[in-house]
Amino acid sequence: MDKKVLLISIDGMRPDGLQQCGNPYVAELERTCAYTYAGSSMNPSVTFPCHFSMTHSVTPQRHGILTNTYVPQVRPVKGIFEKVSDVGGVSAMFYGWEPLRDIALPGALKLATYVNAYMQESGDTVLTDECETVLSTHKPDFAFLYMVETDEKGGHDNGWMSEAYLKRISIAIDNVKRMIDRFGDEYRVIIMADHGGHDRAHGTEMPEDMTIPFFFYGPEFTPGEIIDRKLSLLDIAPTIAKLLGIPCEHEWEGESLI
């Protein structure tokens, strides 16, 4: 691998929720990252289809997963975990929603940790603890940290843009800060959401559901730059592959940011 990459997905994080969560580190992300508050999710704006598109760079209509229940692809497309494995690299995943395990084929992950979010005061923080330990000791080439409590304990339980939702975003951003402070010299870091939300739901084509933020941290990206091209979930896997120095899958539909 040319470099190492850490991808952080904060489930259900709306751009205005990030801007209004009150965490001072948001301003630091704007100063040190290339970023946009106008990125695009997928239709349907649902967690599993969105993450499958994020890691496989094809739309839900192409990979065939339209709900939070995994179904095998009729015409399989390799995702970023499989591409890393193909070249002998090591991937790790840390996730707080059990069905997400199926975004990687069996054998593609060398390291994985699942924490049930509802069994912890902050499962996202527990997962970040584990991610920090694994990155320190095992140095995986690609690591994926998924934080779910913004969506489950914030949006669905209390409503998008509620005080509880904004608090969960702030906790997630504290975890982001910890990872960048610890590993920002060694890992390129991408921070993003899969979808937004409205009321206590998501999954529609409403702007509140479809508009998401993206932040890119590392020397390949211009600090403080507001990205003026339209970014979507499809562009994440190609960008990670470019950073890692590995080939994209020929059927991927997105474009690398670099």
Image (cartoon, rainbow, N blue to C red):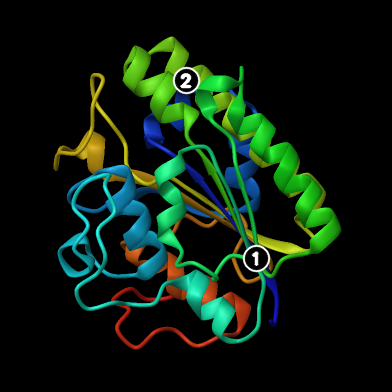
Q: Is residue 234 left or right of residue 187?
A: left
Q: Nearer the viewer, residue 249 or 160?
A: 249
Q: Position of residue 144 (x, y in %)?
A: 57, 55
- Decide: few, some or many residues near mark 2? Use Cα within 10 Å; few <14, some 14-19, many ≥20: many
Write down the residue under mark 1.
110
Q: Is residue 125 left or right of residue 103?
A: right
Give the residue type that dot 1 points to: Lys
- Using the image, determine if residue 186 lies above or below residue 133: below
- Decide: few, some or many residues near mark 1? Use Cα within 10 Å; few <14, some 14-19, many ≥20: some
Q: Position of residue 30 (x, y in %)?
A: 57, 45
- The disc placed on residue 166 is 2
User: Badges 2 and 1: C-beta atoms under 8 Å apart?
Assistant: no
Q: Is residue 49 left or right of residue 116?
A: left
For numbered disc 1, what is the local secondary structure?
loop
- Using the image, determine if residue 109 lies above or below residue 245: above
- The disc placed on residue 138 is none
- Mark 2, mark 1: which one is toward the viewer? 1
> Is residue 258 shown to the viewer in this render?
no
- Using the image, determine if residue 67 lies above or below residue 206: below
Q: Nearer the viewer, residue 109 or 175?
A: 109
- In the rendered image, which quarter is residue 2 located in? bottom right
